Amino acid sequence: MVHTKCHKTSSSFIVKIEMRNRVIESLWVLIFPIAAFALGFYYNNAFYYIGLMLILLLYPFLLTITYLNTLLLPGYTSSLKPRIVKFDDNSLEITYVKIDENSIEIPTGKPVVFKYLEISSFDVIKEHFVIKFNNKKSLIVVPFDSFYSTEDITKITQILNQKLNT
């Protein structure tokens, strides 16, 4: 059994993951306007300024919408809480903790146990394990620095690869 130190994930990291997933899923939404502006710019230079204005106006709006939609879903809000994750051969156990003023970790309820069958995929992004569950609207992020050793990281990688590829 491998367990982690107490850790939590920043909301900005979760939004980066979600933005990346949404951009990849809807790549045509980006390619079509770029192609239209490139074609328009070929005929008239004013399309450069129109495209620049749309990017500067729409990008912050889309980022805000994604930020709010992502962080208000229950599966994502649980990723922001401090937790300890335990990996064993059959399941993944998440214990949410509260840290008091003396830096003592106090469990806040029963541990949540997920069988490996409930995990749809995992990915390694910037020295973090991103584990996605079957319901697609929840994930858990486990940073590499929350493990006690690099052997634990390789063991977890082997376990996740073995359990998810069978």
Image: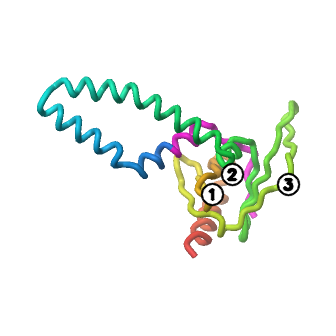
Whole-number angstrom distance, CA of label 1 to CA of label 3: 25 Å
Residue located at (43% from left, 52% from top): 25
Pointer 3 and pointer 2: residues touching (CB < 8 Å)? no
Nearest-to-viewer mark from 3 and 2: 3
Judge the density around disc 3: few (<14), some (14-19), many (≥20) Cα neighbours within 10 Å: few
Pointer 2 and pointer 1: residues touching (CB < 8 Å)? yes
Whole-number angstrom distance, CA of label 2 to CA of label 1: 7 Å
SS type, badge 2: loop
Earlier in the chain: of badge 1 and badge 3, it is 3
Rendered image coloring scheme: rainbow
Residue 5 sits inside the magenta stretch: yes
Judge the density around disc 1: few (<14), some (14-19), many (≥20) Cα neighbours within 10 Å: some
Q: Which residue is mark 3?
A: 110
Q: Is residue 164 above or below residue 145?
A: below
Q: Say left or right for 136 vs 115.
A: left
Residue located at (53% from left, 38% from top): 66
Q: Nearer the viewer, residue 98 or 88?
A: 98
Residue located at (35% from left, 45% from top): 29
Residue type highlighted by circle 2: Phe
Q: Position of residue 128 (x, y in %)?
A: 58, 49
Whole-number angstrom distance, CA of label 3 to CA of label 2: 22 Å
Earlier in the chain: of badge 3 and badge 2, it is 3
SS type, badge 1: helix
Residue 145 sits inside the magenta stretch: no
Q: Position of residue 147 (x, y in %)?
A: 69, 51
The magenta stretch is 1-18
Q: Which residue is mark 2?
A: 147
Q: Position of residue 73 (x, y in %)?
A: 65, 44
**Residue 153's mark?**
1
Pointer 1 and pointer 3: residues touching (CB < 8 Å)? no
Q: Is residue 91 above or below residue 34?
A: below
SS type, badge 3: loop
